[in-house]
Image (cartoon, rainbow, N blue to C red):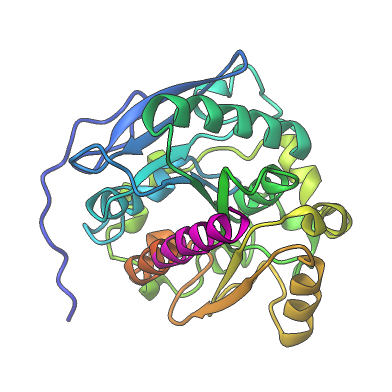
Amino acid sequence: MVQVAARIPAAPDVHGRQLSPGVRPVSVDADGVTLSGLMSEPADGCARAVIVALHGGGMNAGYFDGQAHPDVSLLALGARLGYTVLALDRPGYGASAGRFPRGQRLTAQAATVRAAIAAFTARHAPSAGTLLLGHSFGAKVAFAAAADWSVRELLGVDVSGCGRRLAVNPGLVGCEAGVGLRRLNWGPLGSYPVQTFQVSQPVVAPMPAHEVGTVAGWTRLSAVILPRVRVPVRLTFAEHEAWWRHDDEAIADLTARLSAAPRVVVDRLPHAGHNISLGWTARAYHLKVLAFAEECLAYARHTALRES
């Protein structure tokens, strides 16, 4: 039987989220738009790179600091292994929910996120490269933000819970209740620590209307966005991913659109559901994210030497 390790709860942030040790709230000015989020840093303050994590629809930045078990938090793990991690509350969530009650459309949201990253890295890690990590709708924002981004600043893009073609009726997107929604969002409940559904309530947030409308059009939008991504890309699909098609044909279609990416890695994570960073396999997934970041750092060094 898997034992749940005891942990000392930290004081919640202003959004009611419990935080792991070393994780703290942050506000970032993105060209006049204030975005809230969570951040962690290495103890010595010297970051190998910055991981910018973008949550999915109906969640917030607390998704990357899961509290059901000490092994679940990306923010805690990343800092221990030498990375600065910034998990943003995307536009329409957290501090910007009042300003954008309907959220932002994809291209506008990508521009806001890029401005936030520029401001954050200039202050906290001016010489470090950035890896974009996106989950579900956050993956779409990550791809849109990465399109045409200078390869000297962006190391790579790592996404989960997102394909090109939905495997379900688009009308289910944004629904808060309904038959089968729990299966779509979570997969087998045994894939998650037993306390997940008690401690994750502050992580859940309404999905803004602009995001709901964008999901159905992603197949068309991705055909324009994906060919403009010019950095290494890693795609992870949970074994029990049910929102998106991830059969061989669908994967081939997706990777073919990433025609300018110098490298595309496809990974499948057994025993995982859609909310991959909250499950028992979160640690394995997050370690693979950080390993991919190391590979991207090596690629960037090699490219710089070749061009010098």
Tell me what residue is drawn at x 36 percent, y 75 percent.
Answer: 190
Residue 176 shows in the view? no
Give the residue furthest to the bottom: 248
Tell me what residue is drawn at x 53 percent, y 47 percent.
Answer: 55
- Left or right: 18 in relation to 96: left
Residue 143 shows in the view? yes
- The boundaries of the magenta stretch are 291-308
Quarter of the picture containing the N terminus is bottom left
- Left or right: 58 in relation to 173: left
Give the residue furthest to the top: 32
Q: How many marks?
A: 0
Classify residue 234 by image quadrant.
bottom right
Image coords of residue 94 (percent x, y): 50, 28
47 within the magenta span: no
Image coords of residue 161 (percent x, y): 59, 63
Above or below, 281 relative to 42: below
- Left or right: 127 in relation to 144: left
Tell me what residue is drawn at x 56 percent, y 69 percent.
Answer: 183
Above or below, 9 relative to 68: above
The one of 200 and 72 positioned closer to us in this rendering: 72
| Magenta span: chief secondary structure | helix
Above or below, 55 relative to 220: above
The one of 35 and 166 positioned closer to us in this rendering: 35
Classify residue 229 by image quadrant.
bottom right
Tell me what residue is drawn at x 80 percent, y 44 percent.
Answer: 213
Above or below, 234 relative to 50: below
- Left or right: 206 in relation to 7: right
Image coords of residue 97 (percent x, y): 58, 24
Image coords of residue 92 (percent x, y): 62, 29
294 within the magenta span: yes
